[in-house]
Image (cartoon, helix red, strand yellow):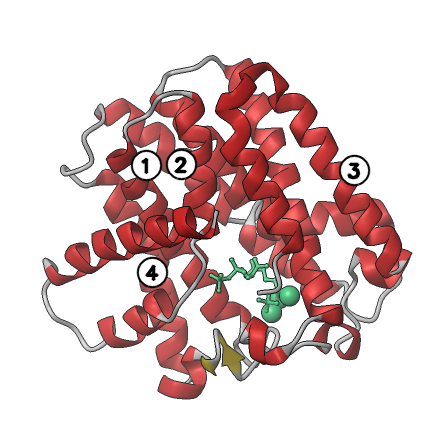
Amino acid sequence: MQNKLNKIAKDTNNFLKKFVIKQDKSELIIPMKYGLFSGGKKIRSKILTDVGSLFNINYKSLIVVGSAVECIHAYSLIHDDLPCMDNDLIRRGKPSTHVKFGESTAVLAGNSLLTMAFEILSHKNLDIPEKTKIHLINKISESSGHLGIAGGQYLDLHYEHKTVSKKEIIEMEIKKTGKLFSFCCVAPLIIKKKNKKEIRKFENIGADIGLLFQLADDLIDYKGSFLIAGKKTGKDKKKGKATLISLLGYKNTIKYANSLILKINRKLKKYGSKSKSLSETLNYILYRNK
Ligand code: IPE
Ligand code: IPE
Ligand code: MG
Ligand code: MG
Ligand code: MG
């Protein structure tokens, strides 16, 4: 699993490096590269290739789509760490982008990474029909705006120090993290021109995977180590974040996460041994320590 993930991370980074080199120079590219290449796991690209292999999609196209996703993810982290958001000084074991380059530069580098995702998906080098590209861009936009990352981040901040129901917490976690995973799960089906019903099914699988990912992130914050995670832990409690751990406790959250894995695996059963890699990734997501 770790070898596969390393290869995907390397291939995604190589694509992004080549893409960036071909662009005209600018000063903002330096903080953008800092946010992109400072050592993320690239787990979203892994999910894309896992689902892509269920539908026999060409690996190279998946890496390009994954690169666009990683741009959006990197943007979301740069903004997540800003003083007006989570106010975190360390990310991936290094100073956060705004600490290194200043707040306004971090905001603008984040904005530029967000739009770079659309540049990548609409680029002529991505060898898929134009109509499919538009469908992908439509979906990834939806995953990033008020119904996705931005909307979820709004709720995350809005819920601080408030009593929030389980349903509301889950909805918030699915928006801020789950929707981008949903995109990763439906992109291969969009490329294969699958029908709406099948797309919806994978959208739901993606939301559950994203929820699982966020629960694991919350578990790392609760029990993990700063040195391994590369970011400060124990901060959710201090900030009064509404998480399932704050509502149900640590053990029940793990139970809930395990039930999510069972639920997702049940839905994958019909793909037989082809879904082995995706199932492996689910276990990695829950039991990771960074
Ligand atoms: C952290 O994401 C933020 C969440 C959405 C929970 P990752 O854990 O994927 O961050 P990197 O890219 O590996 O650093
Ligand atoms: C971030 O969630 C979710 C995003 C969409 C960026 P967190 O705020 O829990 O992520 P970390 O713990 O700072 O990485
Ligand atoms: Mg946050
Ligand atoms: Mg944060
Ligand atoms: Mg966290």
Q: Which of marks 1 and 3 is in front?
A: 3
* Horizontal side, residue 285 vs residue 127: left or right: right
Tell me the tag on residue 128. Answer: none
The three-letter amino acid code for the residue at tag 3 is Ser
The three-letter amino acid code for the residue at tag 2 is Thr
The three-letter amino acid code for the residue at tag 4 is Leu
Mark 3 highlights which residue? Answer: 259
Residue contact between numbered discs 2 and 1, judged by CB atoms under 8 Å? yes
Dot 1 falls on a residue whose secondary structure is helix
**Residue 247 placement: quadrant:** bottom right
Q: Position of residue 165 (x, y in %)?
A: 87, 51
| Sooner in the amino-acid sequence: mark 2 or mark 1 | 2
Mark 4 highlights which residue? Answer: 113
**Who's the residue at 85% across and 66% down the image?**
162
Tell me the tag on residue 62. Answer: 1
Dot 3 falls on a residue whose secondary structure is helix
Residue contact between numbered discs 4 and 1, judged by CB atoms under 8 Å? no
| Sooner in the amino-acid sequence: mark 2 or mark 3 | 2
Mark 2 highlights which residue? Answer: 49
* Quarter of the picture holding the C terminus: bottom right
Dot 4 falls on a residue whose secondary structure is helix
| Sooner in the amino-acid sequence: mark 3 or mark 4 | 4
* Horizontal side, residue 60 vs residue 153: left or right: left
